[in-house]
Image (tube, grey):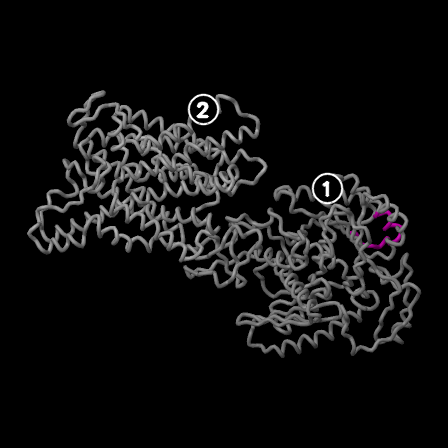
Amino acid sequence: MEESDSEKTTEKENLGPRMDPPLGEPEGSLGWVLPNTAMKKKVRRVRYVKTMKVKVLLMGKSGSGKTSMRSIIFANYIARDTRRLGATIDVEHSHVRFLGNLVLNLWDCGGQDTFMENYFTSQRDNIFRNVEVLIYVFDVESRELEKDMHYYQSCLEAILQNSPDAKIFCLVHKMDLVQEDQRDLIFKEREEDLRRLSRPLECSCFRTSIWDETLYKAWSSIVYQLIPNVQQLEMNLRNFAEIIEADEVLLFERATFLVISHYQCKEQRDAHRFEKISNIIKQFKLSCSKLAASFQSMEVRNSNFAAFIDIFTSNTYVMVVMSDPSIPSAATLINIRNARKHFEKLERVDGPKQCLLMR
Amino acid sequence: MANMNSDSRHLGTSEVDHERDPGPMNIQFEPSDLRSKRPFCIEPTNIVNVNHVIQRVSDHASAMNKRIHYYSRLTTPADKALIAPDHVVPAPEECYVYSPLGSAYKLQSYTEGYGKNTSLVTIFMIWNTMMGTSILSIPWGIKQAGFTTGMCVIILMGLLTLYCCYRVVKSRTMMFSLDTTSWEYPDVCRHYFGSFGQWSSLLFSLVSLIGAMIVYWVLMSNFLFNTGKFIFNFIHHINDTDTILSTNNSNPVICPSAGSGGHPDNSSMIFYANDTGAQQFEKWWDKSRTVPFYLVGLLLPLLNFKSPSFFSKFNILGTVSVLYLIFLVTFKAVRLGFHLEFHWFIPTEFFVPEIRFQFPQLTGVLTLAFFIHNCIITLLKNNKKQENNVRDLCIAYMLVTLTYLYIGVLVFASFPSPPLSKDCIEQMMTVYPLLGYLARVQLLGHIFGDIYPSIFHVLILNLIIVGAGVIMACFYPNIGGIIRYSGAACGLAFVFIYPSLIYIISLHQEERLTWPKLIFHVFIIILGVANLIVQFFM
């Protein structure tokens, strides 16, 4: 997503050899240090220069559903038939940026090819450095549980060596192929196994399927955990919603339209609305891209409600739902524009720790 | 985030609020298109709201809808990667058609069901289809054959045709390499005999249908004639002693098959020769000259209907009339008592011997009476439990045989000529359009590959059939004869020759042909040919 910050004046500062914005403590094995004093005096707005990409690794056995998952979440066309028997030969550098500066890398883990295995072992350090997030996909129908666990463990070892602060998420995928009444049981089993195997690292497990809402929810949870100041964000969102008398306000991540946070002032009937909105807008974006146009904003209005979807901060979209149709659009749009400034300031006020939402 | 709770509702029949039940919807939606267009693809203009009750789609279902739409945008049409698998999309009978406006309607499956009939319904349908005009010719046929012979012949023919029907049903399953689920019997014949087989089987089945229709036409003309006459007499207070319900008339005017099978009474009644008004009426209301044409006006529009469900509802009336016929026969038999005397070989003045050499006439009639071979596959296809097909077929045949025996025995035993009057006619009226539809489906389906190609084609076909009926009604209203000839002719192909021949050929292809089987089936074929030939000599 291109940024529309032409009005911002940016000053580039070279702040050190490695520009990997960490999640938790700025100090740590990654050795990123920012002298606070220099920051406060000199810089009005900070823009970090990236020398290395920060990665989200999407790994799993070939055929476990990673490519489908990626194309569904990121609204990319699937370039090739994902039901082939063969493995993804190349590493997929999808260069999809989300949450500001994260780039998604897709890897097939445990291919049958010895070539694949050699490549994997020789490139290991390269692959596992600068990893922010590791998402490992398990096929619930896989017959080779031992092997899957073995590959998972070797990935974890590599992570421990190269990016020990990475967050680990395990997705037990294709749950729609399991019978309804057995799903909870099977998932619990897997979760325990994975937790056990992952020690000393912590991993969060989700069960997913592309044919229900679980995939969207899992990825939303992942994104939610990647945002450090999410509680504060929600509080500000609530204030915003109350001030403008909105029924519901949603904050979407820009690339994937995953809901980062939301506030609703009364119970909504449809629990699936987030995924539906996300799918609708992604579909619309695909249509726009065919015309070489890019989606910016949308207003939907009828006698019952008015909804506004607009760019918010550099990494987010906002959706505001007003159930009072007498309030003119212009008023809400002005409110959104003013809120935008506030939220951007909010991102920066929290300082360097919140660099995830900054560019 | 915390408010996103998981929704575990199924994408099934719980989709809509249970309080509301949609009435019949007029959606022209082919469920066979479901796979290619799934899951919920219909033009909003085709949705007709009959009840002013709008069904809402559940959130779960509409989320699934959006999901599938979105996924389909991510791949090329040729790519199967993100096509919804069967277990996430509801089965066709649970599918709701979903309008983007949020309302949903349940699909209405047609009466040519999708394998949803219980055994009982299937048996009933087979029985109903086989009960035709033949039921009226059975007593006459028994008279032709003699009482004892008649009984034996009925039972034997029943068994023989049942076996051949069983062969027809099984013929489709003998081919393992091909997908035969949508095949009808002409398709099977085509597979074995080439296009000759297909066309000849089509021709023969049409012969039977047209023969039946001609019979119906004659009967209906008679009925219309007599109704008109009855009304006329009633209005003009003419005492017509020779009316419908006479018991001693050896030439019954309505259903001549119960009598001598001879020509129905074309001559005018004598008692109103002095009335000019009556003569006028006579001129315009003649049984063989004018009434058949009036019938054209009545029935031709009906025949051009497109939808079969209209006729299957009509068909219920036919069943009712058959039952009424049975009841009436029983009633009359009780009233008239049995008039049976057993003379074995010598005809007396009022009774016929037990064994006569004209029994082939009965076999000719019975070939048509037990004829269902051209549509048995279709009827059994809709059976819910396919493994019960053979059993259901046997039960249906047994029921039919019993019905025929019952009617035949009772009518014959309470001879002379019980009044089989209006009841049989009502039956005709309802079955006629259905037969017309069947004929149209068969013929047009094969010629044009489309059941209702255009009003033009349908009209032509109906005109031909009706024309044949009218001609027969005018010149040769001998119902027994018509039934005999058409029955034997088409029975030859469908009942005797084709099933046996196909069985022999398929066994030969599989190297399982044994001498006993070969001899037995060749014997059947010879019987069929003999049946036809002998009709012309009787």
Q: Chain of mark 1?
A: A
The amino acid pointed to by label 1 is Ser
Q: Which residues are magenta?
A: A155-168
Tell me the quadrant of the picture where the N terminus of chain B can be found: bottom right
Query: Is residue A228 or residue B129 the one in the foreground?
Result: B129
Q: Is residue A346 above or below residue B386?
A: below
Marks 2 & 1 on one chain: no
Q: Is residue A280 above or below residue A176?
A: below
Q: Which residue is mark 2?
A: B520
Say left or right for B314 vs B231: right
The amino acid pointed to by label 2 is Phe
Where, by quadrant of the figure, is residue B372 drawn?
A: top left
Q: Is residue A165 magenta?
A: yes
Image coordinates of residue B116 in percent, x first then y, are 46, 42
Secondary structure found at label 1: loop
Q: Chain of mark 2?
A: B
Say left or right for B58 vs B326: right
What residue is drawn where x is 12% and y is 53%? B279
Image coordinates of residue A111 in percent, x first then y, are 81, 45
Secondary structure found at label 2: helix
